Amino acid sequence: MNKTLENLQKEIIFEVKKGYPILLSGAVVFLIFTLMPLVFPIEAVRLIWIFGLGVIFPIGIFISKILGVNLFSTDNPLGTLGGIVAAPQAFYIPVFIIVYMKIPEYLPFTIGLLAGSHFLPYIWIYKSKAYLFVTLGTCLSALILGGFLVDQAFTLVPLAISIVYGMGVLLILKELKVSLV
């Protein structure tokens, strides 16, 4: 039986719960990044940012297992689309490395803008206004705090991103609750 796009979207939303465990993981990682300048020298913090971003996805998978959420919807082509949409982030790593080498004080700005912008397609995939909030909140936070308050960017930008992601999780949970009614 052929499924409509509407049915595929409903199925992916129900199965992967709009991917909120990944956002929850990001909120935790960026909250930890907020505290890094208090513990490590700025040179180490910059490197931790580049390599630490790589733990968001595995932690998100771990969280999804604990919560009973299947992030890998292989039977639904929109699950494949979601993976394809997320994959280009791997190509951002060389950008982060060049920014680290040339203008490291702009890492929070760069990472925040690129990380935030990658959530845009999930607005459509998951029929979610929460992802619009996450996209705009992350990008604007990175732009304003990372672009204009550069001296405090390694503290302010990850704190803002953590808050935006956390609020995004709450908004997604609210959307999921409404869609079940």
Image (tube, rainbow, N blue to C red):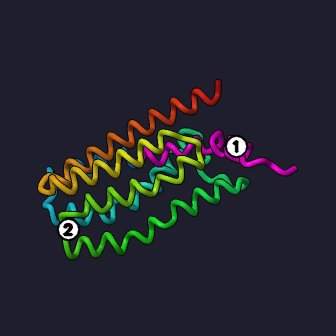
Dot 1 or dot 2: first in sequence order is 1
Q: Which mark is residue 11?
A: 1
Question: In the orientation shown, which residue stands out farthest toward the right?
Answer: 1
Residue 102 in the magenta stretch? The answer is no
The residue depicted at 25 percent of the width and 63 percent of the height is 107
* Residue 74 percent across, percent down from the top left: 69, 56
Q: Quadrant of the C terminus?
A: top right
* C-alpha distance separating marks 1 and 2: 42 Å
* Residue 8 percent across, percent down from the top left: 72, 47
Give neighbour class at mark 2: few <14, some 14-19, many 20+ (Cα, 10 Å): some
* Residue 98 percent across, percent down from the top left: 28, 75
- Apparent side of residue 144 relative to residue 8 in the rendered image (left or right): left
Our reading of the magenta stretch's main secondary structure is helix
Residue 36 visible to the viewer: no
Along the viewing direction, whichever of 93 and 67 lies nearer the viewer: 93
- Apparent side of residue 43 relative to residue 61 in the rendered image (left or right): left
Q: Which residue is mark 2?
A: 104
Q: Are marks 1 and 2 in contact (CB under 8 Å)?
A: no
Along the viewing direction, whichever of 140 and 34 lies nearer the viewer: 140
The magenta stretch spans which residues? Answer: 1-25
The residue depicted at 40 percent of the width and 62 percent of the height is 54
The residue depicted at 50 percent of the width and 39 percent of the height is 129
Q: Which mark is residue 101?
A: none
Q: Quadrant of residue 42?
A: bottom left
Element class at badge 1:
helix
